[in-house]
Image: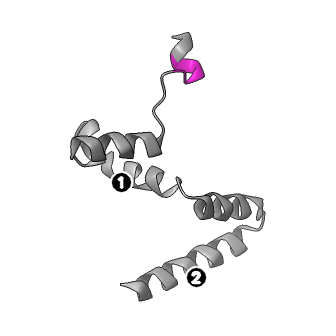
Amino acid sequence: VQKYEKGVNRVGAARLQQIASALDVPVTFFYDGDNKAREVESLLFLDSAFSLRLLRAYSKIKDQTVQRQLVSLMESIAANED
């Protein structure tokens, strides 16, 4: 239990991606069929330096209206990329 609580045996998103690539399987292969695929994709997103910068800046915004506006802006930009 102590190892679990401290995360000693934790496999990070980047390492999991490397393992999946080496085995030529999707990352979702390592998860049960309980809709974890979307969570895994989200974790892989967090592996880049720009993503971490974005999340740190976002977490410093205290005004929820500004947070919602920022999310709407990002969604609009992403929709235009399709």
* Amino acid marked by disc 1: Arg
SS assignment at label 1: helix
> Crowding near pointer 2: few (<14 within 10 Å), some, many (20+)?
few
SS assignment at label 2: helix
Q: What residue would you read off at disc 1?
A: 38
Q: List x then y, in percent, for residue 28.
A: 27, 45
Whether 63 is drawn above or below 21: the answer is below
In the rendered image, the quadrant that contains the C terminus is bottom left
Q: What residue would you read off at disc 2?
A: 73
Residue 14 is tagged as none
Q: Is residue 13 left or right of residue 25?
A: right
What's the residue at 48%, 28% (across, down)?
A: 10
- Of residue 22 and residue 49, the one placed in the foreground of this image is 22
Q: Is residue 34 among the parts visible in the rendering?
A: no
Q: Which residues are magenta?
A: 4-8
Q: List x then y, in percent, for residue 62.
A: 78, 63
Q: List x then y, in percent, for residue 8.
A: 54, 21
Point out the tag, 2 or 1, that comes first from the N-terminus: 1
* Colour treatment of the image: one colour
What's the residue at 51%, 84% (across, down)?
A: 77
Q: List x then y, in percent, for residue 53.
A: 68, 61
